Structure formats: structure tokens, C-alpha cells
């Protein structure tokens, strides 16, 4: 039982066990840059970001934070902070420019250097195969709504298993397939920017299929007994009143159960089929798809930032659409036309997302209750704030406080029996924040986008102390 309103999740001194993994995460298109290096092909995000009006300020990931060229410097910084794990993603078009064919040696070499550099510094490599940068050629052939993309992904997974499968500690097939499917093909807020509700649901299924096929191919090719996982962005859905139960059911089905149920139980829930009946009959699910998707996982990655509050729309006035994502005209919720997303109480991050550490505790406990034998890891949690540089320092008290409160939530979940294996902060660096370009800063390390200089913030020092001591430190001048 959480104590919202009376408990603020600001305890200090809580201790994590030595085997609780503490690290940071990034994604290839957001940090690498080097977009034309080593014969890398274009991704859907290259195309999308260079389309006028799609990304704030016309920003692109061409340079990002230049991690591709500053790899050794960045690895040394990770070591200085004491990171125990680094979750990175592999740029599929850096390996296969067209999404098919033999892998590029230059691309493999880059990730060889990254993984070896991590291991040399005592940092566990956690590799995500897909963090949204689909080769543009595969999108031109149909993208994720096309079944063939799942098979192309399986081939790519096998290549990476062969290349890095003797050293990567943990593999994650997909990052946030909810965003890929619903924001990419439903709302149009993310690449490739399509607004077709049935295509979004086709993408859901083919991403699930890609996950299952990818796990199988990794198991065939990896040789060092790694852990296998997937990373999902869970929506902790709350209702406004007792009349909104149907709204909660619909959004939970679309946001969460569309992925957890096939991956962890080998089925699509009836609530999902009923919610989307006006959009599709799901006839694209064929043969033994569910058996292929349902593969044992060593870890379930949990990404959490804020809660979601819904109610059944009474059709009076303009429907509220405060679901936390850019509104560009389409819908990320196919079939859920009677649901509105209400503005939640603050405080908020710079993204406009509410700060609710109790939501993380509730989510972790709920997942443990639904899937009691499934180990969990927090693979992303963090906050964007408008940092100010003062005399060469960044006193990002709000970010440190946000991280501290969510780690307290994680600790409370563990005390309630949740098998939680670690916490990865999002993000190590300020970076390209998708449709928001460089206007939002999530990093515990600041990047000057003109000089590309790295500057650890106070939150980085706070996190380093946590890792060193295994205890949650206090935060000075906590905002109330």
C-alpha cells in the first residue's frame, strides 16, 4: 500500500544489495551522430527529422552528441561515474544499410570497440537491438505493418548474436514497441509519421513477432549465456471516477497487455480484441505466431516516467488529449475513441509529465502480481528539466530529487517482494529527444551542443555516490 499525499518518497540511507545493478542508458540515434560514417544507411528517423515541420527547430541526429567519434572519452566518463552497466542500442542501418544483406564490417567494428571498452572498464554491456531507427529501405517496403520486417529483424538479430554474442551480458530485443507502433503509425508524432490505426495494430503484432523470432535467433548464436529481455514503456493507468472503468480497461489493453500478454503468456487479451474491433479483425495473426512470440525471458525491462489518467468521454466539449505525447493530429489509441486523457496534477518535468514515484511502486508491484516468476529491471527512468549553468556547474536539484524519489519507490517495491534486479537512469547524456529535438535535456551529463563538451551535473555526482555507497544519498535544497 502506497501512501500518496502523506509519503513523499524522499527517504535517505536506504541500502541496495551489491547485486542490484546501477547504470545508465542511451539510444543510438539520440547520441551517436556519424550518420554517414562507415557506409551507414538512412533510417526512418533520418528521413523524418529532415522533413520540415516534423522536429522542433528542424533538429536532426546527424551529429547528436557525437558519441561515434568520442567513444573513448565517453567510456572513460562512464568509468569515472562508477557505472556498473551501460545500456546502448545498435543502429540497424549501421549494420545493414538496406535492412538486408551481409553486415558492414565498419558497423560491427564500432560496436566491438564499444563492448570491449565497457568490459575493459568493468561495465556490463546491455545491448538493445532496436531503439526505433528502422532502415528506411524496410519502411519503403512496408515497415512494421508488413510481416516481412519481423523476419528481416530476426536475421539482423542473428548477425549481432554472432558478432557480439560472446561478450554482451544482456540482450534486449526491442525498446518501447508501443512508441514504434502507435506513435510511428497511429498518431504520426514519431517516424515514419503515418496516421493509420490499422497499420498501428499490424505493427504491434509484427513487433511482437520480431521479438519472439529475435530471441530465438539470439539463443542460437550467442555463446556466453547472456540474459534475454525486452524493454516496455508501461502506462500506469488511473481513472478519474468510478464511471471510467471501461476507459482504464481499454488503455491498459492497448498500452500494456498488447505486449505483455503475447510475450509472457502467448495470447492477445479479449479486452484488446474488443477495444479494436472497429479497426481490425486481427486476421494478420496467423499459424503459430503466438508460439513464436512467447519466449522465456530472463528480464523484463520496465521504462517509467509518469502516470496516465483517463475517463470515459461524455462527448461534451473538446475531448482532452493529455496523454504525454505530441499531438500532431493522429491518434495513438486505435479503437479507444470514447477515452479522454485528463490533465494530471503537478509538479511536472520540462516534458509536462507529472512526477509520481508512487506510480512506479504501484507498477512494479502490479507486474509482480501478474507475472510472479518474471524478474524485472528498471531500464529507463529520469527527467528533463531546464538546466542552468552557473560558474561552470549545474545544480540540477530537481533531477537528483526525481531520481532519488523513484529509487525509493524501487526500494519499497523490493521490500514488498518484487524481484527487481537493477535501475538504469535515463539518460547518461543530454541528447536528441526525438520530436522535441535538442530542446529537452534528460542527461545527468550536460552536452554543449556547439562544442560537444561534456559536463557532469550534480545529479551525476549524486548517482555516483549512490553506486559507490549502495545507499540512497540525500539531496540538498529539495524543491517542495
Image (cartoon, rainbow, N blue to C red):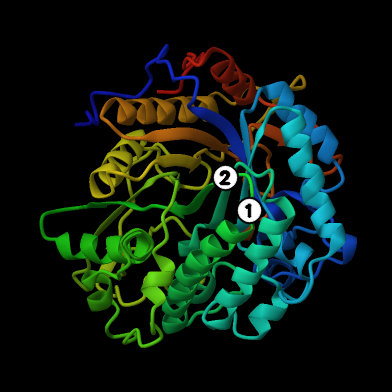
Drawn side of residue 155 relative to residue 310, left or right: right
Residue at 68 percent of width and 41 percent of height: 430
Drawn side of residue 224 relative to residue 307, left or right: right
Q: Could you tell me if residue 227 is visible in this image? A: yes
Q: Quadrant of residue 320?
A: bottom left
Image location (x, y in percent) of residue 106 = 87, 58
Image location (x, y in percent) of residue 206 = 48, 75
Residue at 82 percent of width and 40 percent of height: 71
Residue at 60 percent of width and 25 percent of height: 459
Asked whether disc 2 touches disc 1, contact meaning CB atoms under 8 Å apart, the reply is yes
Residue at 54 percent of width and 36 percent of height: 424
Circle 1 Cα neighbour tier, 10 Å, few/some/many (<14 / 14–19 / ≥20): many
Circle 2 Cα neighbour tier, 10 Å, few/some/many (<14 / 14–19 / ≥20): few
Residue found at the far left of this picture: 242
Q: Could you tell me if residue 330 is visible in this image? A: no
Quarter occupied by the N terminus? top left
Height in image: 43 above or below 33? below
Location of mark 1 (residue): 222
Image location (x, y in percent) of residue 333 = 37, 70
Q: Secondary structure at mark 2?
A: loop
Location of mark 2 (residue): 225
Nearer to the camera, 317 or 449: 449
Height in image: 464 above or below 303? above
**Numbered label attached to residue 11:** none
Q: Secondary structure at mark 1?
A: loop
Image location (x, y in percent) of residue 478 = 46, 19
Amino acid at each position: 500500500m502506497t501512501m500518496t499525499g502523506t509519503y513523499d518518497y524522499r527517504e535517505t540511507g536506504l541500502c541496495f544489495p551489491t547485486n542490484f545493478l546501477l547504470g545508465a542508458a542511451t539510444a543510438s540515434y539520440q547520441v551517436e551522430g556519424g550518420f554517414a560514417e562507415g557506409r551507414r544507411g538512412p533510417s526512418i528517423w533520418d528521413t523524418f527529422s529532415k522533413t520540415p515541420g516534423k522536429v522542433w527547430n528542424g533538429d536532426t541526429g546527424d551529429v547528436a552528441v557525437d558519441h561515434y567519434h568520442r567513444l573513448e572519452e565517453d567510456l572513460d566518463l562512464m568509468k569515472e561515474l562508477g557505472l556498473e552497466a551501460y545500456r546502448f542500442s545498435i543502429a540497424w542501418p549501421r549494420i545493414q544499410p538496406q535492412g538486408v544483406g551481409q553486415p558492414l564490417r565498419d558497423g560491427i567494428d564500432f560496436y566491438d570497440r564499444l563492448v570491449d571498452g565497457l568490459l575493459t572498464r568493468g561495465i556490463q554491456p546491455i545491448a538493445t537491438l532496436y531503439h526505433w531507427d528502422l532502415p528506411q529501405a524496410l519502411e519503403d517496403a512496408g515497415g512494421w505493418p508488413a510481416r516481412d520486417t519481423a523476419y528481416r529483424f530476426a536475421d539482423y538479430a542473428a548477425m549481432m548474436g554472432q558478432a557480439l554474442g560472446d561478450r554482451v551480458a544482456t540482450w534486449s530485443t526491442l525498446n518501447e514497441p508501443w512508441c514504434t507502433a502507435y506513435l510511428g503509425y497511429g498518431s504520426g508524432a514519431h517516424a515514419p509519421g503515418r496516421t493509420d490505426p490499422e497499420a498501428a495494430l499490424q505493427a504491434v503484432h509484427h513487433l511482437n513477432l520480431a521479438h519472439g523470432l529475435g530471441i530465438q535467433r539470439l539463443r542460437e548464436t550467442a555463446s556466453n549465456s547472456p540474459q534475454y529481455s525486452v524493454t516496455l514503456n508501461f502506462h500506469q493507468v488511473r481513472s478519474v471516477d468510478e464511471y471510467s472503468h471501461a476507459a482504464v480497461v481499454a488503455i491498459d489493453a492497448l498500452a500494456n497487455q498488447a505486449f505483455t500478454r503475447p510475450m509472457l503468456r502467448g495470447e492477445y487479451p479479449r479486452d484488446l480484441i474488443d477495444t479494436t474491433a472497429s479497426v481490425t479483425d486481427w486476421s494478420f495473426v496467423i499459424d503459430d505466431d503466438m508460439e513464436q512470440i512467447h519466449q522465456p525471458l530472463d528480464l523484463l525491462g520496465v521504462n517509467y516516467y509518469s502516470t496516465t489518467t483517463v475517463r470515459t468521454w461524455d462527448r461534451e466539449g473538446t475531448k482532452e488529449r493529455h496523454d504525454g505525447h505530441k499531438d500532431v493530429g493522429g491518434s495513438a489509441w486505435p479503437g479507444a475513441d470514447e477515452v479522454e486523457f485528463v490533465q494530471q496534477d503537478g509538479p511536472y518535468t520540462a516534458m509536462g509529465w507529472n512526477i509520481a514515484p508512487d506510480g512506479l511502486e504501484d507498477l512494479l508491484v502490479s507486474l509482480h502480481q501478474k507475472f510472479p516468476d518474471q524478474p524485472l529491471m528498471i531500464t529507463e527512468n529520469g527527467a528533463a528539466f531546464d538546466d542552468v549553468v552557473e560558474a561552470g556547474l549545474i545544480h540540477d536539484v530537481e533531477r537528483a530529487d526525481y531520481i532519488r524519489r523513484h529509487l525509493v519507490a524501487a526500494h519499497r517495491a523490493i521490500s514488498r517482494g518484487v524481484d527487481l534486479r537493477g535501475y538504469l537512469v535515463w539518460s547518461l547524456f543530454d541528447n536528441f529527444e526525438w520530436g522535441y529535438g535538442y530542446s529537452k535535456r534528460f542527461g545527468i551529463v550536460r552536452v554543449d551542443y556547439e562544442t560537444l563538451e561534456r559536463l557532469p551535473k550534480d545529479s551525476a555526482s549524486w548517482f555516483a555516490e549512490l553506486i559507490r555507497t549502495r545507499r540512497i544519498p540525500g539531496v540538498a535544497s529539495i524543491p517542495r
